[in-house]
Image (cartoon, rainbow, N blue to C red):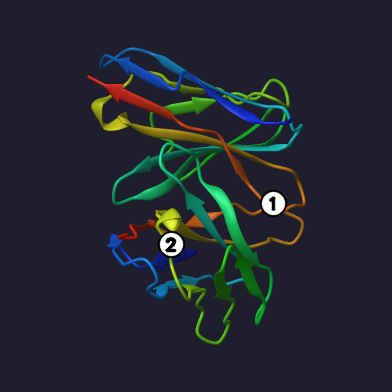
Amino acid sequence: GDSVVQTEGQVLPSEGDSLIVNCSYETTQYPSLFWYVQYPGEGPQLHLKAMKANDKGRNKGFEAMYRKETTSFHLEKDSVQESDSAVYFCALRRFYGGSQGNLIFGKGTKLSVKP
Amino acid sequence: DAEITQSPRHKITETGRQVTLACHQTWNHNNMFWYRQDLGHGLRLIHYSYGVQDTNKGEVSDGYSVSRSNTEDLPLTLESAASSQTSVYFCASRAGGTDTQYFGPGTRLTVL
């Protein structure tokens, strides 16, 4: 079945550090890929997305490249800020011809940026 | 502004009681979803609906049920609450043919 595996647990960079949160996916179909972000006390919200291979999603200095050859969608940022602290979920959604397709989420990575 | 709301935001109940969590969206989205979030498990899909009178089981549906009598609401019922159902529950909706899923603020349920 479909699956998403991402960096587990917590990541603790200092403000100004670069960041990579790994995400790898497995599916038999051609998916769309997403990163959702969840701030404390809130529901997840869409952070960025990429619809096809070699697309790059971008938002608030974060980027993720859809790499079909390595089945990856790693989240990257050159210089993290304390306000980036949140839980990040990688997700995929595939299409079944005319069907809807549901999101498949990774287990989440907690980003805690030290001031 | 259109939105998605959940109620209650916090609930404490006892084992064996029936509990219903409400979800209401004003976007007129056809697709609605219920997830539970637990440490180490991420977001797991409980039930989903693609339209009025349509309901489907997700990966962790045992002990839960939903009904969809109108476009705006998808209540989640725990028929006989168990301690294993202590969790944070999120409702979400998405318009058909689009990619962005919108989540509610969550309900924290504690079963004693």
Compare residues A30 and A58 and report the one nearer the observer.
A58
A49 with respect to B19 (left or right) = right
- Does dot 2 land on a helix, a strand or a loop? loop
Sequence-first tag of 1 and 2: 2
x, y (%) of residue A68?
Answer: 58, 82
Q: Quadrant of the N terminus of chain B?
A: top right
x, y (%) of residue A103?
Answer: 56, 54
x, y (%) of residue A7?
Answer: 35, 68
A2 with respect to B84 (left or right) = right
State how far apart marks 1 and 2 are (Cα). Answer: 36 Å
Compare residues A88 and B93 and report the one nearer the observer.
A88
- Does dot 1 land on a helix, a strand or a loop? loop
**Badges 1 and 2: C-beta atoms under 8 Å apart?**
no
Can the viewer see residue A52 in this picture? Answer: yes
Q: Closer to us: mark 1 or mark 2?
A: 2
Q: Quadrant of the C terminus of chain B?
A: top left
Q: Is residue A82 above or below residue B102?
A: below
Residue type, label 2: Gln
Taking the view exactly as shown, the residue that stands out farthest to the bottom is A69
> How many marks overall?
2
Image quadrant assignment for residue B49: top right
B61 with respect to A13 (left or right) = right
Which residue appears at 73% of the width and 37% of the height?
Answer: B30
Q: Is residue A19 above or below residue B91?
A: below
Q: Residue A81: which disc?
A: 2
Can the viewer see residue A32 in this picture? Answer: no
**Mark 2 burial class by Cα count in 10 Å: few <14, some 14-19, many 20+:** some
**Mark 1 burial class by Cα count in 10 Å: few <14, some 14-19, many 20+:** some
Which residue appears at 24% of the width and 27% of the height?
Answer: B83
x, y (%) of residue A46?
Answer: 59, 53
The residue carrying mark 1 is: A100
